[in-house]
């Protein structure tokens, strides 16, 4: 929770740049560009404190000089201490707002959006505990907010780096690692049957994007 | 394998001296492709991998390309995985604009289809990878290349996790086609 409050606090200075009269403006219209790209997403600071590595893709439709939209899909794999595997499938969209100059090598942006996801946690076969493999899954929706920057390599190609905090609303897949007789064991369970629960994680994304069409 | 790679790289470095020419092949719109053998060395264990490596690359500008790579895994006796086919997509930045000897670096996210030897379920594994190498465009239609790649990923299943981090090397003869008229 503290991480989330810190993250929101960091976003406040952006309001100073949101005043229309102090925004720098580009001289060329950029709305209508359609970009296609691939990405690696790294999931961190989740409930299990492990690193998830993902592959995905996205397309962008720029609706104005200052506003872009990103539509993405990710598949993220996470090893939970060698005891279980977590798979996350994300599909969603983000609106990207450019508070600064848009014609530059580095173009920072703020993003916010929604996501739908499917999560599956499978325990691995353990010869010491001889527990049968167990699988738990859930569907949930999420909302995300974050910061990022485009690194424009040319007018057509950019690399984008972003970090976003994603908060999931739905039943929680809880994985808890504990020691029993000197051996690590994992307990997984689906929680929140009777109500909603929140679960968040910090995502870092590195993407390569190609502007391939001018839609309008 | 590292020594062999160093020898090959040193031999090719000499080409830089001969590649100063006014007839620059690399221009916007160039399409290059190749099929070769790739050798991989695991960074986590004493294990070597062999692949059939195919690559397609398009020059959006003379210095930037979009490229896709496929690696078809050829299992050998020392492998713990019997399926490890990989697919990558991304971009590369090419350094030289005045020479046909063109070094490059790039990033390519990827996916692998992986399966433990002796099991039946094939898993999908996300991959992070970076490439570096060079092409020597000896003629309008073909080039020589050396391509090195670092791949990072982890095969996850209902058995213990299995890292597939690897340093990979491919080299050989590639082909290039000019798809746009010179301005």
Image (cartoon, grey):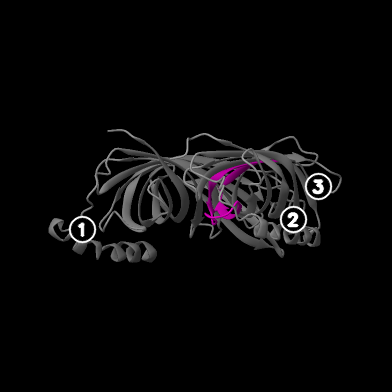
Say which residue appears at 15% left-offset and 58% top-offset.
A19
Q: Main secondary structure of the magenta part?
A: strand
Range of residues picked out in magenta: B84-112
Can you give x and y, in whole percent of width and height, for residue B147 in the image? 67, 51
Q: Marks 3/1: CA distance? A: 57 Å
In the image, taking residue A70 as reference, residue A134 lies left or right, namely right
Circle 3 sits on which residue? Answer: B79
Quadrant of image for the N terminus of chain A: bottom left
Mark 1: give few (<14), some (14-19) or many (20+) Cα within 10 Å: few
- Chain designation of label 1: A
- Chain designation of label 3: B
Q: Marks 2/3: CA distance? A: 10 Å
Location of residue A179 with respect to A25 vertically, above or below: below
Quadrant of image for the C terminus of chain A: top left
Quarter residue A14 falls in: bottom left
Q: Nearer the viewer, mark 3 or mark 1?
A: 1
Quarter residue B47 falls in: bottom right
Mark 3: give few (<14), some (14-19) or many (20+) Cα within 10 Å: some
Residue A36 or residue B8, whichever sits in front: B8
Residue A193 or residue B77, whichever sits in front: B77
SS under mark 3 = loop
Circle 2 sits on which residue? Answer: B42
Circle 1 sits on which residue? Answer: A24
Can you give x and y, in whole percent of width and height, for residue A155 in the image? 37, 48
Can residue A55 be seen here? yes
């Amino acid at each position: 929770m503290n991480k989330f409050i810190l993250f929101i606090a960091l976003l406040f200075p952006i309001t100073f740049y949101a005043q229309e009269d102090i925004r720098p403006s580009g001289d060329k219209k950029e709305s209508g560009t359609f970009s296609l790209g691939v990405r690696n997403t790294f999931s961190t600071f989740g409930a299990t404190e492990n690193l998830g590595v993902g592959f995905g893709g996205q397309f962008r439709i720029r609706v104005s000089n200052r506003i872009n939209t990103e539509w993405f899909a990710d598949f993220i794999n996470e090893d939970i201490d060698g005891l279980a595997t977590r798979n996350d499938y994300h599909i969603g969209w983000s609106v990207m707002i450019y508070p600064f100059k848009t014609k530059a090598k580095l173009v920072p942006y703020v993003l916010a959006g929604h996501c739908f996801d499917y999560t599956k946690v499978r325990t691995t076969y353990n010869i010491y505990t001889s527990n049968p493999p167990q699988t738990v899954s859930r569907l949930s929706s999420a909302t995300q907010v974050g910061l990022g920057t485009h690194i424009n390599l040319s007018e057509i190609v950019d690399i984008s780096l972003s970090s976003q905090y994603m908060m999931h609303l739905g039943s929680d897949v809880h994985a808890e690692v504990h020691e029993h007789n000197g051996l690590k064991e994992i307990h997984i369970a689906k929680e929140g049957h009777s109500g909603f629960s929140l679960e968040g994680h910090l995502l870092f994304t590195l993407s390569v994007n190609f502007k391939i069409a001018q839609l309008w | 394998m590292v020594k062999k790679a160093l020898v090959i790289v040193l031999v090719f470095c000499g080409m830089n001296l001969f590649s100063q020419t006014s007839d620059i092949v690399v221009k916007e719109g160039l399409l290059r492709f190749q099929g070769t053998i790739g050798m991989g060395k695991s960074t986590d264990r004493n294990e070597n991998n062999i692949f059939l490596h195919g690559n397609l690359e398009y020059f959006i500008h003379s210095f930037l390309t979009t490229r896709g790579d496929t690696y078809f895994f050829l299992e050998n006796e020392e492998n713990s995985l019997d399926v490890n086919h990989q697919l990558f997509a991304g971009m590369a930045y090419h350094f030289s604009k005045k020479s046909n000897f063109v070094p490059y670096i790039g990033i390519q996210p990827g996916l692998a289809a992986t399966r433990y030897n002796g099991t039946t379920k094939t898993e999908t594994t996300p991959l992070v990878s970076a490439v570096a190498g060079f092409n020597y465009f000896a003629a309008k239609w073909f080039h020589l290349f050396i391509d090195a790649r670092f791949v990072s990923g982890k095969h996850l299943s209902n058995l213990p996790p299995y890292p597939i981090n690897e340093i990979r090397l491919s080299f050989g003869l590639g082909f290039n086609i000019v798809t746009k008229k010179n301005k």
